[in-house]
Image (cartoon, rainbow, N blue to C red):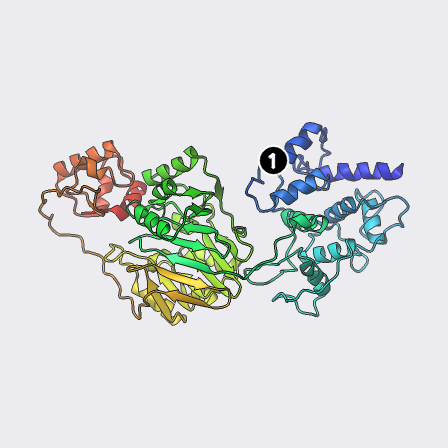
Amino acid sequence: MKRIFCIISIFVFILSSCGFFQGAEDGTTPQNRITPQNIEAQATQFMDVDTEYWARDEIHFLFNREIIRGYDDGTFKPGNTVTRSQAAIMIAGALDLELEGRPAPEFVDIREGFHAYDVVAAVADEGIITGREGRFMPNAPLTRGQMAAILTRAFNLSGTWDREFNDIRTTHPFYDDIQALAANNITTGYTSDNTFRPSRPTTRAQFSVFLARTLDDTFKPPEPTQAGELVLHHLNVGQGDSTLITTPNGSTILVDAGTQTAGQAVVQYLKQAGIDTIDRLVMTHPHADHIGGAVTVMQNFTVSQVIDSGAEHDTQTFINYLEYVLSNDIPFHIAEPGETLDIDPAVNIEVVNSGQAGDILNNASVSLYINYGDFRYLITGDAEVEAERRIVDNFQVASDVLRVGHHGSITSSNNFFLQEVRPKEGIISYGVGNRYGHPHQEAINRLRNNGVTGLYDTTGDAIVVRSDGTNYQIVGEQQPEIPPVEPDPDPTEPEPIPEPTPDPVGPTYPINVNTADKETLQHITGVGPAIADNIIEYRETHGPFTSIEQLVNVHRIGPTTLDGMRDEITI
């Protein structure tokens, strides 16, 4: 009878103490927690565990086995830390441990009346969690190393992995436990840098995944394969960015799609490469030179999922992109640092940046670190100094090849960043004669001074990087020196207005705002009929524009709208 009572007590404690149906944050006892409706609703969906969340299936598996629960606000909080007492409760539930008749636990910090007293007694008696120096430390975070020890003891795991983690020496106290987890294919560690990180706290999602893999082999990751090639195509899209990635199992990722005018060139390149499906369309950030061609791409290919930083923009280009995704029910996911794009077990693709509150759009760029065997590659969109600092502070991103940030701008490729990335090769995407002066000579100098021996640009044919996981090669012409491109000076006198030349295909970019008619002006990002009329009215009243910045004087054009127009206009 006591065992039944204790199991019910554990179940209630799981709902309250572990936060698995926790509503009151002030320590008050939750009321009316357990209902069939609550269980069914949470088994179906947690608000913060969407269909694409990496640990969704494992979380729901454990939920349905009544080993874990969610919060009664409909969330699971997968990033929260698991404590040692919570781990004890889940292990006891997973093993269906007998709680009655256990010896009193000899821990100075566990007394009768403690909510998990019987559970602690059981796991200690079984030798699963032994504590340290007479203390159980029930509220301390469970580290990843401790998790390994608990799982190997609880489920009698053994074995030796045929490899070593970079941060686990043979003298490490949890070396054998971590080796056993790896040998049983319960962990692959952090494949981006081949570490296990044993001192890091274990999150609820991580514990769920490890426990589910221990209980059910179907959750174990597939054995990685080194067959095939990883190929990265850096397209010529002018002053913009677009990179096609194909993995050894044939999966495809397109990172950015260039400007609106470059969209068709991207489509043509992909079709020539035999692409018919894009498994992940990654839009690093909302600037027009990165998302402008996205709609054209989505109109021509089946897109399995769009991955976005979540940053917003008020330009028409961004609105068109987002509306197309929503109206066509394309799965949409906001990237989070630390998660992976699980499309090929042989390749680890980790998100190392996606912005944070208060970021400028460039610093919200989704950045990916790709690891295939011994080959490593980093692509950062337009990430500038703040984002670069976050990346190197939070991730190990040493790379063979760097997709140089922000078209070779002085705002990116900072020395502290390059000293951590240590790339041997750099690939820069920019348009010849662009008005920003990209690439800036100072950025080129930093790359050279930090050991980049091979610099390539996309102003000619696409630059293609191929790797078999051991070696890599770059197909394309190396630029021994990339000269700086001086921006065009602002004219001191307005140029004469030429007769417009008909364009049967469409407007030629950049569009001259001093000469374009109403219809042509509407091809500029953010410019509709009303703003086009306002531009024409302004120049008829005040004369031709003498600088791009002067456009903010036009009614309904503010700094944000102008920012979206810059890449597509000239005077």
Residue 539 occupies quadrant:
top left
> 463 or 194: nearer the eye?
463
Q: Is residue 560 found left or right of 63 in the rendered image?
A: left
Residue drawn 48% across the image and 65% down it: 420
Secondary structure at numbered mark 1: loop
Left or right for 53, reference 304: right
- Residue 252: percent from the left, percent from the top? 45, 51
**What x and y, as percent, mark residue 281?**
43, 46
Closer to us: 477 or 60: 477
Within-10-Å neighbours for mark 1: few <14, some 14–19, many 20+: some
355 and 249: which is toward the camera: 249
Observer-nearest of 568 and 391: 568
Q: Which residue is mark 1?
A: 45
Note whether residue 203 is visible: yes
Q: Which amino acid is tagged 1?
A: Gln
Residue displayed at 49% across by 58% down: 370
Answer with the quarter of the image where residue 487 lies: bottom left
Percent across and percent down for residue 419 are 45, 67
Looking at the image, residue 275 sits to the left or right of residue 26; the answer is left
Can residue 381 be seen from the camera position used here? no
